Image (spheres, coloured by chain):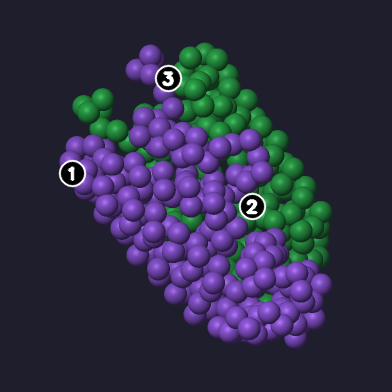
Chain colours: A purple, B green
Amino acid sequence: MTAPQTARRGRPGYSREQVLQIAVALFNEQGYDATSVSDLATRLGLTKSALYHHFDSKEQLLELALDSALGGLEGALDAAMEHDAVAEQLNEAIRGAVRVLTAQQPQVTLLLRLRGNSPVELAALQRRRAFDQRLSSLVRRAQHEGLLRDDIGAGTITRLIFGMINSIVEWYRADGAIDPQGLADDVLSVAIDGLRRPTAR
Amino acid sequence: MTAPQTARRGRPGYSREQVLQIAVALFNEQGYDATSVSDLATRLGLTKSALYHHFDSKEQLLELALDSALGGLEGALDAAMEHDAVAEQLNEAIRGAVRVLTAQQPQVTLLLRLRGNSPVELAALQRRRAFDQRLSSLVRRAQHEGLLRDDIGAGTITRLIFGMINSIVEWYRADGAIDPQGLADDVLSVAIDGLRRPTAR
């Protein structure tokens, strides 16, 4: 990590946070592997050496973005687990994941597209697997309590529901008409009650 | 397209189809943009010129793989639409999509990860959008017939359901324990009836 006073030496107008944001957008656009430090410097209108005043390496930018996405998801799940009832834990885990995906869409997109081609990526994938196991264990508890159907395994259910949630990063537009809170409620409702019209049941 | 007799001139042991299959696997592993013809030749143990006996360009390999994925998805939807009842059309559209995703997982993975960085990619994305519009229109008809809830817009419902379906490419293993037909039934059931335990309704 570069010290804050070093970070200030870059071209005026970019904070570290802004450089990171633009880097993540470029990684998502071109792919992380296909993006060079030169590409990023060009996008920012900085020289490579000016860019290195902000960050040590391309990998450091990736690591910070992934930590932000994973930290957000883990924090939302931690908050959900503070509820006493399993039903509330599950509802809040689903709502919380949607909130993080909409609030940190570029970072989560990067996380979901990781291929595991470097130690930083492998570490993030391992952390993501631990997160997925916590979700799966929550789904299993909800099945044991009779809240969720148990004719389908907890692993498959978790993958289908969080697959639906994760797909939001592909189409959600932060400047669009869809309210994140309303979307979180819709996702929860579709996941739990399905799409069949209630009166047709 | 190279003529069949030309394709035979490559190293014995690779058919055109096998070269394509290995190329798609490599594109998914490294990203299409980050994969060079040299990378592919190395993976195949061929010289670049031997590889060019099979295919004209990296882009041609991409185009064939995307056409295979899109053709499969469109064909499954066409078959679903031959049913008379909208309920059957919807059920078969969902089941058919799961079947194509499991049968053509590498090609569909490539399709779903496209960024639109070239004319071939943009053409495939446009064809995918047309496919998505057919699905959305089917969901809308099912809402009008009272089969599906209409408190959530057809666009959001389509994205959530096919987001769930598309996420299957991320974790399905063709050599694993999950039967594609059983998975198609599970996905349909979760989509329509949700996860709540029936007796708890």
Q: Which residue is mark 1?
A: A144
Q: Are marks 1 and 2 on the same chain?
A: no
Side (left or right) of B129 relative to A64: right
Pointer 2 chain: B
Q: SS for tag 1?
A: helix
User: Mark 2 and mark 1 in contact (Cβ < 8 Å)?
Assistant: no
Q: Amino acid at mark 3?
A: Arg
Q: Are marks 2 and 3 on the same chain?
A: no
Using the image as rendered, state which of residue A31 and residue B46 is in the foreground.
A31
Identify the disc placed on residue A197. 3
Report the label total.
3
- x%, y% of residue A55? 64, 80
Q: Which residue is mark 2?
A: B111
Pointer 3 chain: A
Q: Quadrant of residue A6?
A: bottom right
- Does residue A91 sit above or below B154 in this rendering? below
Question: Of discs 2 and 3, which sits in the foreground?
Answer: 3
